Image: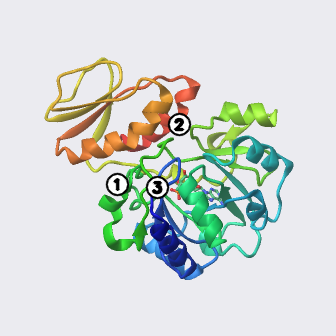
Amino acid sequence: MPSEQELVRAVWLLQNGGLVALPTETVYGLSANALDVAAVQRIYDVKGRPKTSPLIVHVASIEMARSLAREWPLEANILAGAFWPGPLTMVVKKRPVVPDLVTAGLDTVGLRMPAHPVMLEVIRRAQVPLAAPSANRFTEVSPTTAQHVYDSLGDAVDLILDGGPCRVGIESTVVSLAGEEPVLLRPGMISREDLERLLERPVRTVGDVEGAHPSPGLHHKHYSPRTPAVRVSDGKLPAGRVAYVWWRTPADAAVAIRMPDDVAGYARELYGALLEADRAGVDVIAVEATPTAAEWAAIEDRLRRALQ
Ligand code: TXA
Ligand code: MG
């Protein structure tokens, strides 16, 4: 955990236009004061991220969320009550105080209260909401340790706070509450079924909705290792030197990375495994197919994007 001096420095940097990589329970975030346009601009520059991708704004209280939202529907209160702090981002209509650069010109803003003591403490002390995408270069696999952040961004950030490995390991669920009906924009460990149970009505996915904004997290070629990566089953590996990410079927590979067999453990270790496989200098990464059950939907989503 970071020292008191590091916390003080992080807060000072964020209040003065700096960029600080902070741990959250999902992945590490590249944070800036969401209300400081020049600081937010640096996020896009450092990540190499197109301006058409809106950023999530992180808050430390529902009051802070409401200060950024023009409308705070009852359903936002229900979901915040159930899942905040936690891996859920809610898209709601924004107030003018939220810069257009943060929201890629949209009339809505994605809000999340992260469940990590370091990020929450920094937001409380800085007294500003933090815009934070995952702390990696655009299209790369998201970082789940401070070392991953350093490997991807190095000295391009002003400070990296080390809060240990991320407990959840894949990005938050993103749900839009800005329209007539709730829409799941990005699957995560809080499932569509969890949302439907709480809201007591169907939650559609982006694919189901006519003319909805595709969420830029659903961008083609996101979360990809540099090495070609394929999905395999029954331990049947491709030719060449292979890094094999497996969870059920062992096989003879140059590098073998075993995954936990429960979905939460799998999610926690997925990006670390892909980054390790990528660093191994093999010809191909082979990932054993995971179950098709609903609770694996978020894993399936990330693998589909990584494996192409
Ligand atoms: O777990 C997470 O969400 C991590 C940590 C750091 O909090 N952050 C993260 O940020 O994954 P990023 O920038 O990599 O992904 C942001 C996602 C994208 O899919 C984006 O489209 C969606 O949130 N998003 C943000 N604001 C939105 C808006 N106003 N409308 C639609 N989608 C939005
Ligand atoms: Mg990302």
Instruction: Name the residue that disc number 3 marks.
Output: 28
Crowding near pointer 1: few (<14 within 10 Å), some, many (20+)?
many
In the depicted view, which residue is nearer to us: 275 or 216?
275
Q: Amino acid at mark 1?
A: His
Residue drawn at the location 34% of the way across and 54% of the way down: 148
At 56% from the left edge and 51% from the top edge, which residue is drawn?
116
* Residue wearing tag 1: 148
Is label 3's Cβ within 8 Å of ligand 1?
yes
Q: Label 2 is placed on what type of residue?
A: Ala
Position of residue 308 measured from the top left corner of the image (x, y, whole percent): 35, 42
**Residue found farthest to the front:** 4
Answer yes or no: do the residues labelled 1 and 3 have beta carbons within 8 Å?
yes
Instruction: Classify the position of the N terminus by image quarter.
Output: bottom left
Q: CA distance from mark 3 to mark 2?
A: 18 Å
Asked whether 127 or 204 is in front, the reply is 127
Q: Is residue 238 visible?
A: yes
Query: Going from the N terminus, do you reach mark 1 or mark 2 first?
Result: 1
Separation of residues labelled 1 and 3 (CA atoms): 9 Å
Q: Which three-letter amino acid code belongs to the residue tagged 3?
A: Tyr
Position in image of residue 203 (x %, y %): 73, 38
Q: Which residue is mark 2?
A: 298
Q: Secondary structure at mark 1?
A: helix
Q: Earlier in the sequence, mark 3 or mark 2?
A: 3
Q: Residue at x 45, y 31 (%)?
A: 265
Q: Position of residue 63 (x, y in %)?
A: 78, 62
Looking at mark 2, is its residue's CB closer than 8 Å to ligand 1? Answer: no
Of helix, strand and loop, which one carries label 2?
helix
The residue shown at (75%, 44%) is 79
Q: Is residue 174 left or right of residue 74?
A: left
Residue 77's mark? none
The mark closer to the camera, 3 or 2, is 3
